[in-house]
Amino acid sequence: MSSERVILEVSARESDQIGSRRVRRLRREGFVPGVLYGKGHTRAILVKERALRTALTGPSGLHAIVDVVIEGQKSPHHAVLKQYQQHPIRGTLTHVDFHEVRLDQPIQATVAVQLVGEAPGAKEGGVVQQVTRELRVEALPTEIPEHIDADVSSLEVGGTIRLEELPAIEGVAYLDDPETVLATCAISRAAIELEEADAEAEAEAEATGEGEDGEGATDADADEASSEDAESDAE
């Protein structure tokens, strides 16, 4: 659960500076522009990228509750990360959106799904495929799970794991369709080709055996006919 609290010190900025030469310069200097959304107010902020990455790479990851402290203010704003943008090549953060939350009111969040366990079907030549990688949940900010585990230790070839099969998490409500497929185990193409090759080889072996039996019968008939002709000549 994301009970970890991270303090993030930020500076206020002018909201019309997005895309300006000054903001581009600030990005080069290691700052990331962002917005803190709250009820009835929106604040444009600047935060050091290093501090931002530190805040979002802790045990709770992107679901950490961040105590945003705006320069010149004493009271922190409890917030969660809602959106971020990265440079397409360098991968650096270019913009972040934080949403202020109340710790006593539930919020909605998207949580990653992790497959755990060893599927018996995989040992029988099947391939486990993860169909759904994220689920939407609703919970108090401090109860949002870091990830959701889907146990595949009972997954056989041809089987599926659905959302409705997951154990309940106290304080967490799933918002997706209970029939949502999380993982499947299908026979691999290589295994199918191997079975087809074995079937073809078996069919060829049976055909060869039947042919040899037929040839043996023909030779016996020929010998019997020759014997009958010889007896007729002797008479």
Image: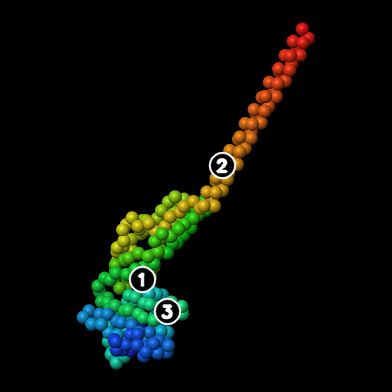
Please name the amino acid that badge 3 sits on: His
Callout 2: SS: helix
Point 41% across, 84% down: residue: 49
Q: Mark 2 points at which residue?
A: 199
| Dot 1 or dot 2, earlier in sequence | 1
Q: Earlier in the sequence, mark 2 or mark 3?
A: 3
Q: Looking at this rendering, what residue extends furthest in the left direction?
A: 40
Q: In this view, does 122 lie above or below 67?
A: above
Q: Distance between the residues labelled 1 and 2?
A: 52 Å
- In the rendered image, residue 45, in percent from the top left (x then y), is placed at 32, 86
Residue 9 image-quadrant placement: bottom left
Residue type of the residue flagged with mark 2: Ala
Q: In this view, does 148 lie above or below 48?
A: above
- Judged from the image, the secondary structure of the residue bearing numbered disc 1 is loop
Mark 2 surroundings within 10 Å by alpha-carbon count, few (fewer than 14), some (14 through 19), many (20 or more): few
Question: Residue at 21% across / 80% down in the picture?
Answer: 40
The Cα–Cα distance between marks 2 and 3, rounded to whole angstroms, is 54 Å
Between 170 and 172, which is closer to the camera in this rendering? 172
The amino acid type of the residue labelled 1 equals Met
Q: Which is more toward the observer, 18 or 34?
A: 18
Question: On the image, numbered disc 1 is attached to which residue?
Answer: 1
Q: Which residue is found at the position 68% from the left and 27% from the top?
A: 216
Q: Quadrant of the C terminus?
A: top right
Labelled disc at residue 165 = none
Which numbered marker is on residue 87?
Answer: 3
Sequence-wise, the earlier of marks 3 and 1 is: 1
Q: What element carries label 3?
A: loop
- Disc 3 and disc 1 in contact, CB within 8 angstroms: no
